[in-house]
Amino acid sequence: MSTPELAAVLGGGANFEALVSHLLSGDDSIRKPAEDLFEKSKEQPDALATNLIAVLRQSQLVEHRIFAAVMLRKVLGKDDPPLLLSCNQQVQALVQKELLASLKDETQKTVVKKVCHAVAELGAAVSEQNGWPDLLPFLFQMIHSPQPDHIESALIILGNLASFMIDGMRPHLDQLVQVLGQCLSHANKDVQLAALAAASAFIQVLEEPAERDKFQHMILPMLATLGNTLNSGDEAAAQEALEMFIEVAEYHPRFLRKSLDQVVSAMMSVTRADSLEAATRTMAAEFLVTLCEARDKAPGMMRKLPNFAGSLFETCMLFLLDVEDDPLWHNADSDQHEEAGSGDLYEAGQENLDRISIALGGNAIVPAAGTLLPQFLQDADWKKRHATLICLAQIAEGCAKVMSKQLGPLVDMCVKGLQDPHPKVRWAACQALGQMCTDLGPDLQNSHHAKILPALMAVMEDFNAPRVQAHACAAVVNFSEGADADMLPPYLDHLISKLLGLLQHGKKTVQESALTAMASVADCSQALFIKYYEVVMPLLYSILIGAIDKAHRLLRAKALECISLVGMAVGKDRFREDAMRVMQYLQQLQGMEMDSDDPTSSYMLQAGARICKCLGKEFLPYLNIVMPSLLKSAQIEPDVKVRDYEEDDGDEDEDDADVERIQIGDKTITLRTSMLEEKATACNMLCCYADELKEGFLPWVEQVTEIMVPLLKFWYHEEVRRAAAQTLPELLRSTVLAHEKGMLPNGAAAVDALLNRIWGPMIDILNKEPDVDVQSALLDSVSEMVELVEPTMLKPEWVEHVFKKFSHILTSAEERRQERLKRREAEDFDVEDLQELEEENQQEEELFDQVGACIGTFLKKFGDSVLGYVESIMGQIAPLLDKSRSAEDRRIAVCVVDDLLEHSPAGRAKYAGQVIPVLLEACTDPNNADLRQCSVYGLGVLAAKAPELFRPICNDSLQRIMAIMNQPNARDDDNEMATENAISALGKILEFSSEGIDANAVAGAWLAALPLTCDRVEAQQQHHFLVRLLEAGDVRILGQGNANLTKIVAILVRVLGDGTRLIEGEVGRRAAALLHQMQGNVPADAVQGPMMALTAKQQANLQVFMSGQIPASADD
């Protein structure tokens, strides 16, 4: 860029205006050099500012004046640092003076609005330095002008200044409140709207209630402004006003509390006004729904408003009537017209029902639904019957607890809808059943499968309504995902036959849905599907290789999905040969050039991982086929665009369902979500491969590591971050196993290098991760890595650093807990809010649990070496033991105590006296079996590890342990883990702390309670102890005259029948040898009886042990 050219342009006059003209050109060859020259001109801020002001004030072209105003704002005010501050004092004064003059002199409203934004931005830019002393006096002067345009401009600027520099405005609040109140009553509608916008802006940014309350008296005048716009027929202005009310409701809903009746009544009237545009009505509804969703800021406020929930529910139902029977909807050749006939109100009604059911809860919504829906379902108008069933689908998630008590009537409504003469009603019934299977399952499936499946299969026969057929298949998918395999046998023959018929004779979209249904049924039925494999698989493969044209790409992709799920269901022995053919076909596809929007690509990612899971190590030869596309998808860069909010018209992607739009401050960010979903899927599949193939994944470890480490900070998508966190320890495991099996020449060095690459980024991100679930996954991965490597590989400074991170996480979690406690003190807090808080508490408890697990892992690995670090955060763990905390919080803290007692001798000696009373009390907690389990486990640890510390509490402990074991419901599912840990603790007392107790009585009680079948770790320990006692001929166990042999034989038969799950392999062989010896000393039925109670698989395990061998794997 030549200096003379720049000097000529900045010399002013026609040259600079010519530059502006070029900057606005649609011709790239003209605009691009002009942009470069303009960028260069920023190096001379005084000249640039002077020229922009000259164009703004003197140009005859409106578009040039608009450009000058926008650039004054963006270049002088928004750049960091603002360029205006680089100008000399004279130029700054000139800019300020001329901008204010322009507000008075400019006649074009579009230019004036841009100048208003520039004034506000520049006012904020200079506020912390020289300030703009003349600005506020000028604005207050303008507000008293007789010209409405001047008043409107001043109000626009004041509203913007509220966002930019509220601290500088606070001294003028009283004056502002006065003038805004006056302007809301102005005769000019534009002035009223500007005053409404300004008042809304101040209400939003003022955090102190006392300051906001100064605007309380304006609520009704603000409402009157909305009414004026509606009465004058200016719905565009009304929508602007509604948007401002929505923002107030979102930021400070309690501000509206004193006038809530009037505001809600007015908004409800707008939603019901048939004469208004759909956009106006939906925005009024949005305001009401936003208030419902403000549970953290105004808990219970809307539920306690009389008749509100029922009225809003009815409004949403009326919105659902905005639907027509469009002929295009019946054309089921594609999904293109699935929404045909649905109006804007219908779409809003669907969304709002979903949102209010979640926000207000079932106790508020279900009574309203119970009154209205039966009337609608009996109505002659198909639209009302359709609306009823759509409503059930929408409210099921939010009202699940209440609706679960009414499953029978709900199913009957849906089954009746499936028999309706109108196809759209039948479609809606499929929708309702499918969604309820998801939200109310598995109880719905368990109790009403005999009604649901036959009704859905009957609808599949309706070839005159292909869209209904397809949706019935979709409902079967929902049903299968929540059903147990043992529920399906009575229906499988008929269901598979129906789906095969649809695959052979249905329209394309029906075939696609039938494939998904077949896949889901196979996934649910597992081995039961082997019966149908020979018929189903050839057809699936035929569809896969025959769907080659563009119109059938989704059909091909779904065939691949179905094949992979069927393969997983039937197992590798049945699937192996077909898997080879499928992988060879996928290899051919890889060599073809597929379109970027071909769904086959993303389906291939998941299908390959499923086939890998099915074949296990046998998949290794195919890994080279799937990895290139997988790595490519994992490295997709996000399609992100950032625009100024004011200048984003959204035309490019406004109707694109694949684009998510987020407003942050004055910026609009757009994200293409399908690309992010593909990336997340690929990352999850890489984790799958590494997990399944173990050391076989070694050739890819380095490349995948370099992809995954940066993705720990992929802020656009939490699922990508979670997958990265879960994959990294699997890569470490692959390398460790390869080292242990001699596959790496410098194995230890390779493990150390990989650990050094991933440890730092993983730990650094721990307390920065914003999503609690992902944070839990990160903590779990830290535990895994610590377990995998030698202690010497974890540097002392690393360990110290990670404990500091644990402390930070616990501190943040406690701060969030305190915030939740404050919400409980709110005036309108009610039962529904309590349920929401409990759900949030559960998330936090999972986080606490993961921190506790990490601490335990470090104690197991390092023992006393990390005691100091553990002590540094015990001040944050100990409060969890308080009785005011939840039982889950207390359980987590007791688990940390257990690990300390078990793995740190110094910690045990130091803290046993403090924690023993806690363990004794908690092990008798009547309300929480998990707390009893971990507490009695701690007593067992003390008995085994520190008999001298345990001896004084031995008898007390025995009483409490026996109380757990002797409860009438001790073997119920909820109590079994606590019971088995009590039995194990009894065994440890017998083994390590039997001095001074009635050992014969303890031994008898312990033997009578065996075997352990639930807690695998404790089972293996206690059954090993039993074998040692038997080998030693311990009379306490055998009984006088071997009186206990029959019981012992039954225990051994049951334990050996479970393979290596309940007893270690070598110990099992010893137990089998003992069983051989005992068989001749007991009646035959003492052996045959327990054997007959075993399953065929368990009997096979027993025979393997009895032959002197060890079963290949545990029978879980």
Image (cartoon, helix red, strand yellow):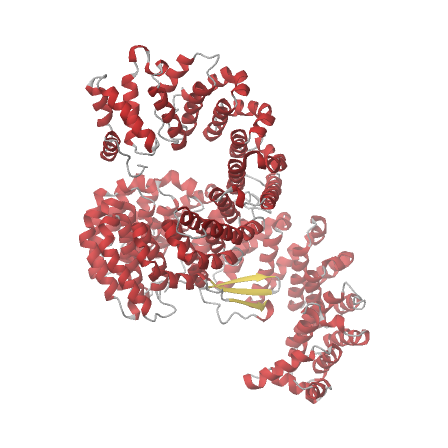
State the count of labels.
Answer: 0
Point out residue 277 in the picture as x, y percentages from the top left corner.
49, 65
At x 46% / y 31%, what residue is drawn?
Answer: 930
379 on left or right of 710: left
User: Is 66 in front, or is 855?
Assistant: 855
884 on left or right of 781: right
Quadrant position of the N terminus in the picture: bottom right
888 on left or right of 592: right
Does the rendering let one see residue 367? yes
Q: Residue furthest left?
A: 535
Quadrant of res 866: top right
44 on left or right of 420: right
Point out residue 604 in the picture as x, y percentages from the top left corner.
34, 60
- Would you place residue 35 above or below residue 245 in this image? below
Does the rendering let one see residue 838? no
Point out residue 922 in the picture as x, y percentages from the top left corner.
52, 25
- Would you place residue 192 above or below residue 867 in this image? below
At x 25% / y 62%, what residue is drawn?
Answer: 544
Q: Residue furthest front?
A: 745
- Would you place residue 864 above or below residue 542 in this image? above
Quadrant position of the C terminus in the picture: top left
Quadrant of res 336: bottom left
Point out residue 984 in the picture as x, y percentages from the top left corner.
42, 24
At x 76% / y 59%, what residue is drawn?
Answer: 168
User: Is 288 in front, or is 24?
Assistant: 24
